[in-house]
Image (cartoon, helix red, strand yellow):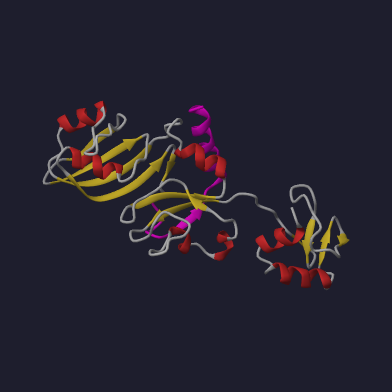
């Protein structure tokens, strides 16, 4: 990796700023002052210091966000604010992306990372990673609906969704349910309930694989995953291989 790119990614300014630091002899690699900002380093093995302070390299970032309504699950959008807009520049330097899609008005657990391999595996239909949603449903959800979800519901466009789990938490005029899916088609939860004559009035993802939404995160808040949470997600993927 180029030295100027490494230091720019770590927040030491633009590549021009890094070049100025090097010119002032503020940067060393393996205890030797560096003169060329385009020189290459191995951040995992080389000792890089700025102003005699060690630069700790981080290849990947893993962020859990409690997505608020009104934001789209994308890196850029011409019309709407994206979940990436909620992140500070320190995270944006990693060029992260949201894993999977939550609709603009859907809330809850969203993983944001720059680990392309993990992101692809978590959303791959072949892996079948479970996603759990809490939903408020306009209409009385019944055991017959549960059975239909188990069989696989045919959506209004003719597509038959894979079998899913529907747990009734409270049945009534506004029913409260959990839905567990292994796929993620566009507006899938909403379309599944539309196909049985009911309407989703509130939707929140609460779990992906073994990763549960941190209840301490308010809407719009985020934090980095712990090492145990990262390992758990990777184990989810490996078990599905």
Is 220 in the magenta?
A: yes
Q: Position of residue 160 (x, y in %)?
A: 27, 31
| One can see residue 65 in this view | yes
Is 100 in the magenta?
A: no
Q: For this view, does 23 lie left or right of residue 101? A: right
Q: Position of residue 50 (x, y in %)?
A: 77, 65
Q: For this view, does 44 lie left or right of residue 85? A: right
Q: Quadrant of residue 185?
A: top left
Q: Quadrant of residue 8?
A: bottom right
* Residue name at image x 55 percent, y 38 percent: 231
Q: Quadrant of residue 219?
A: bottom left
Q: Position of residue 228 (x, y in %)?
A: 54, 41
Residue pushed farthest front?
Answer: 157
| One can see residue 228 in this view | no
Against 160, residue 60 (above or below) is below
Segment colored magenta? 214-241
Along the viewing direction, whichever of 119 and 215 lies nearer the viewer: 119
* Residue name at image x 78 percent, y 73 percent: 20
Q: For this view, does 196 lie left or right of residue 216? A: left
Q: For this view, does 89 lie left or right of residue 208? A: right
């Amino acid at each position: 990796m180029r030295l100027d790119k490494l230091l720019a990614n770590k927040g030491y300014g633009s590549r021009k700023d890094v070049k100025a630091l090097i010119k002032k002899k503020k940067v060393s690699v393996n205890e030797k002052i560096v003169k060329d900002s385009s020189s290459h380093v191995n951040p995992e093995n080389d000792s890089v210091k700025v102003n005699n302070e060690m630069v700790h390299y981080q290849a990947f970032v893993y962020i859990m966000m409690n997505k608020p309504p009104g934001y789209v699950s994308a890196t850029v959008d011409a019309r709407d604010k994206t979940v990436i807009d909620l992140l500070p520049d320190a995270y944006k330097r990693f060029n992260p992306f949201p894993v999977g899609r939550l609709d603009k008005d859907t809330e809850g657990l969203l993983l944001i990372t720059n680990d392309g391999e993990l992101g692809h595996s978590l959303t791959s239909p072949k892996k079948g990673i479970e996603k759990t949603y809490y939903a408020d449903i306009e209409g009385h959800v019944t055991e017959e609906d549960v059975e239909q979800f188990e069989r696989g519901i045919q959506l209004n466009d003719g597509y038959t969704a894979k079998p899913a789990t529907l747990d009734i938490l409270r049945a009534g005029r506004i029913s409260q349910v959990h839905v567990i899916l292994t796929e993620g088609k566009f507006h899938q939860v909403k379309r599944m309930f539309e196909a049985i004559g009911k309407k989703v009035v509130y939707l929140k993802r609460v779990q992906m694989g073994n990763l549960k939404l941190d209840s301490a995160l308010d809407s719009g808040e985020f934090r980095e995953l712990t090492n145990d949470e990262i390992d758990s997600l990777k184990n989810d993927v490996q078990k599905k291989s």
